[in-house]
Image (cartoon, helix red, strand yellow):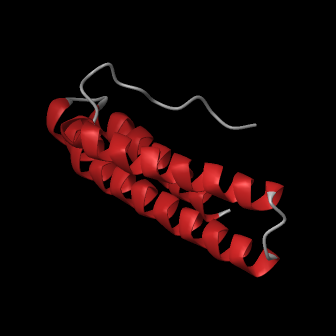
Amino acid sequence: MSETPVHDHAQHGYSANKEAYQRRLKRIEGQVRGIARMVDEDKYCIDILTQIAAVNKALHAVSLGLVEEHLGHCVVGAAEEVDGEGRRDHIDAKVKEATDAIGRLLR
């Protein structure tokens, strides 16, 4: 069983790029609908697999961007914000949260 992730109520690292992420995800959503249409129309399976690979690549690009922003904003922010005794635990929790997320991406 996995542990509950550590979430801050502060602004998330991707907030500055939220619109760009939303545009990319809308494009991916359109690609997925296109794949569903291809299946419905009995298109050649290799062509469908090619489109699925393109969607996976696009999702990985979004994922890597979010991981980078999480590390640069949330993890670094945790290191800068917390003073005293709880600092190391807070930083460790943020690093573990990022590591767990990367692990899920690699499965």
Number of numbered discs visible in the structure rendering: 0
The residue at the point 35 percent across, 34 percent down is: 90
Snapshot quadrant of residue 48 = bottom right
- Left or right of 74 in this view: 39: right
Q: Is residue 66 above or below residue 10?
A: below
Snapshot quadrant of residue 38 = bottom right
| Quadrant the C terminus occupies | bottom right
Percent of width and height locating residue 12: 28, 32
As drawn, which residue projects farthest toward the front? 41
The residue at the point 61 percent across, 64 percent down is: 106
- Left or right of 63 in this view: 50: right
The residue at the point 72 percent across, 53 percent down is: 36
Residue 52 appears in the figure: yes
Q: Is residue 75 above or below residue 104?
A: above
The residue at the point 65 percent across, 66 percent down is: 52
| Quadrant the N terminus occupies | top right
As drawn, which residue projects farthest toward the bottom? 46
Residue 13 appears in the figure: no
Percent of width and height locating residue 8: 34, 24
Percent of width and height locating residue 45: 80, 75
* Closer to us: 53 or 86: 53
Percent of width and height locating residue 46: 75, 80
As drawn, which residue projects farthest toward the top? 9
